[in-house]
């Protein structure tokens, strides 16, 4: 994994940091387990995913109120995922700022391809320059959206 110094951005009383030590796994887990994309995700999986990603924690004071992470090879490719801002802080353009901070990281300028999957905020990503991929036979996936639910309760299919 590539090594980068901790990056931080400040805006009024808010901070976005890539400092792995500051990421609040419990807070990230609390949100993700109720999100539309990771319902039922276990804490260990969240911790492992954070450990193996370039993370952007959004803080108001000492409270983590948002998050985004890049799963990346630090050279050519990244997958932007797990982006959220707590409901109480939405409508203040903090999500837009969080994405801008991701884009401002030094690794981002090197990347040839950045992908994301969303059903919750396409307008946010469009503002940041992302475009949908609607070419036949171009993007392929194996999707298992209920993997956490099924893993936690193997009798459910």
Image (spheres, rainbow, N blue to C red):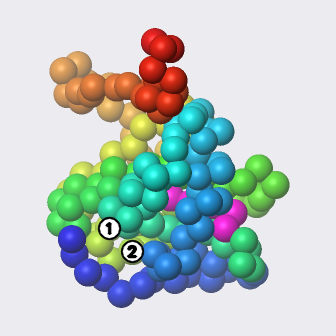
Quadrant of the image occupied by residue 119: top right
Quadrant location of the N terminus?
bottom left
Identify the residue under disc 2: 105
Identify the residue under disc 1: 108
Secondary element at tag 1: helix
**Residue at position x 51%, y 44% from top?**
42
Residue 79 in view, yes or no: yes
Q: Is residue 43 above or below residue 100?
A: above
Front residue (pair 108, 60): 60
Quadrant of the image occupied by residue 58: bottom right
The location of residue 145, given as percent across then percent down, is: 44, 26
Judged left or right of residue 47, residue 70 is: left
Write the start and end of the magenta stretch as one range.
Answer: 64-70
The location of residue 19, given as percent across then percent down, is: 47, 79
**Residue at position x 65%, y 50% from top?**
30
The location of residue 89, given as percent across then percent down, is: 77, 58
Front residue (pair 84, 99): 84
**Residue at position x 29%, y 72% from top?**
107
Q: Which label sits on residue 89?
A: none
Secondary element at tag 2: loop
The location of residue 148, given as percent across then percent down, is: 47, 32
Contact, mark 1 vs mark 2 (Cβ under 8 Å): yes
Residue 98 in view, yes or no: no
Circle 2 Cα neighbour tier, 10 Å, few/some/many (<14 / 14–19 / ≥20):
some
Magenta residues: mostly which secondary structure?
Answer: strand
**Residue at position x 32%, y 67% from top?**
108
């Amino acid at each position: 994994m590539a090594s980068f110094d901790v990056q931080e951005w400040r805006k009024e009383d808010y901070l976005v940091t890539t400092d792995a030590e500051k990421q609040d796994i419990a807070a990230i887990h609390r949100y993700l387990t109720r999100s539309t994309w990771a319902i039922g995700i276990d804490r260990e999986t969240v911790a492992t995913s954070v450990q193996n990603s370039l993370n952007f924690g959004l803080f108001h004071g000492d409270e983590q109120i948002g998050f985004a992470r890049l799963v990346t090879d630090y050279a050519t490719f990244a997958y932007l995922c797990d982006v959220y801002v707590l409901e109480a802080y939405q409508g203040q353009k903090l999500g837009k700022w969080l994405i801008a901070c991701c884009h401002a990281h030094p690794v981002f300028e090197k990347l040839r391809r950045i992908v994301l999957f969303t059903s919750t905020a396409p307008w946010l990503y469009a503002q940041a320059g992302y475009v949908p991929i609607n070419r036949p036979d171009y993007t392929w996936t194996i999707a298992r959206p209920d993997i956490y639910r099924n893993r936690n309760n193997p009798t459910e299919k």
